[in-house]
Image (cartoon, rainbow, N blue to C red):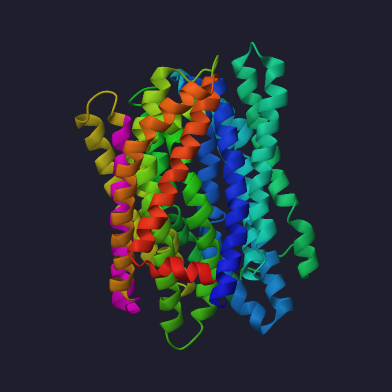
Amino acid sequence: MKTNKFIKSSLIVGICTGTSRLFGLIRNILMAHLFGTSALGSAFVLAFRIPNLFRRLFGEGALSAAFIPVFSEAYEKDKKSAWKLASTILTLLTVFLSLIVVVVMLVCLLVINAATLPEVWQLTFKLLLVMFPYMLFICIAALFMAILNSRYHFFFPAFAHILLNIIWIAALLFLCPQFADDKIAQVYTVAFAVLIGGIAQMAIQLPVLFKQGFRFTINFDTKDPRVRKVIRLTIPAAIGMGVIQLNTFLDDILATCVGDWAPAALSYAYLLVYMPLGIIATAMGTVLLPVYSRQSTELTTEKALRTLNKSSRMLFLIMPAAAVGLTILAPIIVQTLFQWTNGQFTDESLTQTYRALMFYAPGLIVFGWYKVLAPFFYAYKDTKTPMKVAMFSVALNLILNITFILTWPDGYKHAGLACSTVISSTFNCIILAYLINKRYGSPNWKNILAVLVKSFVAAAIMAIAIKIVQPIVFSTFSKIIVYQKLSEIASLTLTIAIGIVIYLIVSACLNHNELKSLRRK
């Protein structure tokens, strides 16, 4: 794929993902207003995280990484054979995940009826009964996304993510008020909305798939070497691609040891971090895998390494500013977005969430870079290396989690969980970069690091400017605009805009060639 087309495809995915993240932000504001950091809010977070983890492990992460290179290669040789491969994978995936759904739901029933659990876990298992089937539909949707992405169709797979948030928001705005005095009924309403959203994400892609030539036939041909290759690659990729999700899931589980409020606080913070991460890094990662896969068929690694260089520089141009901005503005961002009149998001919820955000935000850089590094290995059909590195990362995260819970002061223990995820993810990226350099050659690390250093310098100057400007802006708007929340929103928007302008000006003064190349393209 040419650079122009790569940027255009990344832009399409980025716009759709950005729209989805915007709706996701509205969704989270409404969730915070209804449930705050209560035990009910934390129970929903834990129950939703489990099928979502499976989605990352067996859906859009691992399966895409294993399927796209094999399907792309098969499609180049014989289209009919490639569609047969897709049908076989869909058949096996549906049967396998259906069995998991049945087993997990039976376990939930046994636990609910036979065990005496703390309130947050009792609620979690009850909500999981409703939401776990979502995993089946969203994983099938992820396979459809992989097929379409391999054919360089990015719009509808990216747009599918928006549907879940639209359905979720509709439930919060129009159905939950019908149960104004019953928080349990409200949270179950949202749980059923999640399930419907998963079905919608799967269904919307079917017309485009059929137009491409896909016709589903039940096929259990496990003797096909290509099917075996996809299965063989999927298992290690599940651990490799899901490393960040595994770490955040560990954070949520251990957070219950800190307090019933902690999983909800961590979730609100992480979802704020996921806004820029999803718009930029996820969009790039989605486009990169098919690009890497096609380039990996060539005799040399020169083109793939060049793509790695360009995507890393593009990422490092943006993420440091986003990470620094989120860190220094964390209290104001959380207050402005989540704390509304008559809501359940209290001052205590505010403190709990912004502390977590301040420690999650620096991870934007490595969370994003991982989405650039890991697909490089998968394109060369090497899913074991990221898996091995990921296992080390998860182990390190677990050790740091326990250490920080035992050593950090009360009120910051949950922030320590966020910090451990960032540290373990940093080591994960450094090791992957070292292995790429060792096995495939250098993508010109000096060039990449130069961009990162310049971006940090620009971000540091931006941070100083924001610290000076922000109190003045907020004070001025509070006098002009009577309505407090509108004043907060306007002040935060202007502060962020000023920060972006300053960052761009400083970057231009530092002769950022990447800014010039982006303007040209």
Task: State the image coordinates of residue 328 (x, y, percent, origin top left).
Answer: 34, 38
Please provide the residue range marked out in magenta. Answer: 414-443
Compare residues 500 and 107 and report the one nearer the observer.
500
- For residue 265, side relative to residue 195 (left or right): left
At 51% from the left and 67% from the top, the residue drawn is 519
| 269 lies above or below 11 | above
- For residue 222, side relative to residue 170 (left or right): left
Task: State the image coordinates of residue 47 (x, y, percent, origin top left).
Answer: 53, 33
**Residue 254 visible at all:** no
- For residue 227, side relative to residue 156 (left or right): left
At 68% from the left and 26% from the top, the residue drawn is 173
Task: State the image coordinates of residue 479 (x, y, percent, origin top left).
Answer: 47, 21
Which secondary structure class fits the magenta region best? helix
**Residue 97 visible at all:** yes
**Count of picture labels:** 0
**Furthest-top residue in this view:** 181
Task: State the image coordinates of residue 324 (x, y, percent, origin top left).
Answer: 35, 46
Indicate the quadrant where residue 354 lies. top left
